[in-house]
Image (cartoon, coloured by chain):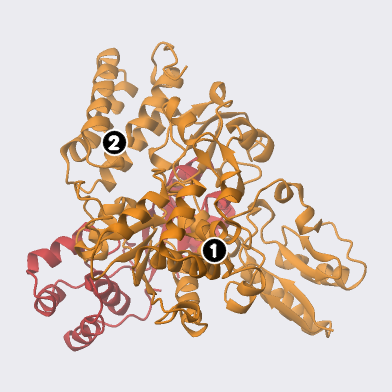
Amino acid sequence: MTQGQAPWNEEVALERIRGSLDREGPLLPILHALQEEFGYVDEAAEPLIAEALNITRAEVHGVITFYHDFRRAPAGRHVLKLCRAEACQAAGGDPLAAHAEARLGVSIGTTAPDGSVTLEVVYCLGLCAVAPSAMLDGRVIARLDQGRLDALLAEAQQ
Amino acid sequence: MTLRLYVPIDAAALAVGAEEVASALHAAAARHNVAVNIVRNGSRGLYWLEPMVEVETTVGRVAYGPVAPSDIDELLTAILADGAHALRLGPTEDIPWLKRQTRLTFARCGIVDPRSIEDYRAHGGCKGLERALSLGAEAIVEEVVQSGLRGRGGAGFPTGIKWRTVAQTRATQKYIVCNADEGDSGTFADRMIMEGDPFVLIEGMAIAGIATGATKGYVYIRSEYPHAVAAMEAAITAARRGGLLGNYVAGSSFAFDMEVRVGAGAYVCGEETSLLDSLEGKRGQVRAKPPLPAHKGLFGRPTVINNVLSFASAPIIMDKGAAFYRDFGMGRSRGTMPIQLAGNVKHGGLYETAFGITLGELVDDIGGGTRSGRQVRAVQVGGPLGAYFPRALFDTPFDYEAFAARDGLIGHGGIVIFDDTVDMAKQARFAMEFCAIESCGKCTPCRIGAARGVEVVDRIIKDDHRAANIEVLEDLCNTMKFGSLCALGGFTPYPVMSALNHFPEDFGAQPRLQAAE
């Protein structure tokens, strides 16, 4: 779902910020809205949010960096998340993750040089009875074995 | 005549091809010139049989599974003829794995259309709310107290006492917050409810609102659950339209409304106080208690914060009465627990049953052992902060106190099964590593202890002063257990110490006296 995201634009950002201002505790909804719009939360958004919420820029920065979800830079065209939590470990997830790293030539947490895919780890997708599992751009896939994973990797490299 | 079929829309069913099965069914029906109505239900929880297709017949629903898109043509032909097929499982309700369960909280999950409030009402929904409205606030709280319901998130605190505290605290604004940040590996019951029977959660939260005088609710769902987020948002919209939420809940003088909030990938936000900080738009850091959330919770207001399953159990308690619910279970663990069998398991899924069933029955009889076919060596109960249990402890009954007595916890009811290829030293290391990654950083024992813990386990594995480092690890675990602000740092020693105590050979250590015996 990272495909086709708009480049950073201050006007659009302000619009998305204003869209959540009437909610209680609007900061997380704002950050999610920005990430949905641009695929990441640009540093230039920090003063805009701080101004709108009347909090310090440091507070905004602190919140963005606390949560694993918020990116500081755009991801690849695809984002592949592999579950590495216990249920997936028990079902053979670790060797599959190693296989994915080797096949894509990227280590977990990084993006392929051609910008095709960002490989990430996730701790639990709640698919523990059909482990091991993964998520490709918001689509869930389980009962992974090498064959199913290879098909996913090929898709992610497009 | 229109053929009524069911294909789950549950995320785990989708992850193994339910969407493709539904599309193939539509296409095949068109080719066969058959009118079909495909209902997208939640999952029955028999995940090794997903995607499971059900057919409405004159004698009830008949199940087929696990179905692949390539099976569809043959399957539809069989359904239209006499129904015989290699994948035919028989009447769904008669499948032994389902029939042996006691489904109270999950009574409707997998049966109803999760997007239809009419279907919800047709299957007994809203009856708890109606009785709650006729009883009034104080009697609702009393009923929940009497039911013996304890927090299903893991801590096991009596739900009714929480509600009573909020009810008795005076404030102009109170909140109901649902903790749907189901981050424990091996658990998926909250997700199943939200995707399969979302109205029961809405009804439960509305009952809590009426009981305590709270008019606003939040469901905090983890971002890893996009399907649950979508299902809850759709259900809330339908509930507003259907009069279940709004200024006059079910036509009464009570007002209650709610909204979904999405987390951002922080495991620690499953801890109730850090969840509240996160909802407020802050870093999800744990708060020191007191004050209790019941006194000063969300935005400093009195707040009921409960797990999805706790709220989802309230409607049946209100409908059937406290005694009905309390009659299930053992000791101080009353009612039923939706247990989740996961990992390397043959028959994985959701098994709701009264407290008291033994761990061995769950793993061997119901779970059927491992999917790999190898011996079960260890099971982790209660998520990443739960202890690893060896076979020797499989006689432990599923009960809050019985697990505590053996240095474990039932947590949110997840059981992750490992076969004999597992390296328990590696699992202990992972427990520390996970704690280090997810620590909120507020208290030192957790923030520093977890990082040191990884290093110490590494030294033990490398046989670098092994005996001395095992002592260091034990000491470190004690510090974390007693010095941490919340369960993340405080319970990480459970998996670490249980791995060391029950599987010392994996650490290169001498067999130890079983601490739990």
Q: Is residue B13 left or right of residue A20?
A: right
The one nearer the camera, B294 or B28, is: B294
Give the residue drawn at x 51%, y 53%. Answer: B188
Taking the spot 25% from the left edge, 80% from the top edge, the residue there is A20
Element type at mark 1: helix
* Residue B144 percent coordinates (x, y): 47, 53
Above or below — where is A84 with respect to B318? Answer: above
Quadrant of the image containing the N terminus of chain B: bottom right
Q: Is residue B192 left or right of residue B383?
A: right
Location of residue A51 in the rendering, given as x and y in whole percent from the top left corner: 9, 78
Residue B217 point in image, percent of width and height? 36, 69
Residue B356: x and y in percent read 59, 35
Colour orange maps to chain: B
**Is B410 located above or below residue B314 in the figure?**
above
Name the amino acid type tagged 1: Ala
Distance between the alpha carbons at the discs numbered 2 and 1: 32 Å
Of B63 and B510, nearer the camera is: B63
2 or 1: mark nearer the eye? 2
- Residue found 41% across the figure and 20% down from its top: B501
Secondary structure beneath dot 2 equals helix
Of residues B407 and B139, the one nearer the viewer is B139
Residue receiving disc 2 = B490
Q: Residues within 10 Å of mark 2 (few under 14, many from 20)?
A: many
Q: Is residue B180 above or below residue B184?
A: below
- Could you tell me the amino acid type at mark 2? Gly
**Which quadrant would residue B5 be assigned to in this image?**
bottom right
Q: Colour of chain A?
A: red
Mark 1 belongs to chain: B
Residue under numbered circle 1: B11
How many neighbours does mark 1 have within 10 angstroms: few (below 14), some (14-19), or many (20 or more)?
A: many
Label 2 marks a residue whose chain is B
Q: Inspect this view and state whether residue B151 appears.
A: yes
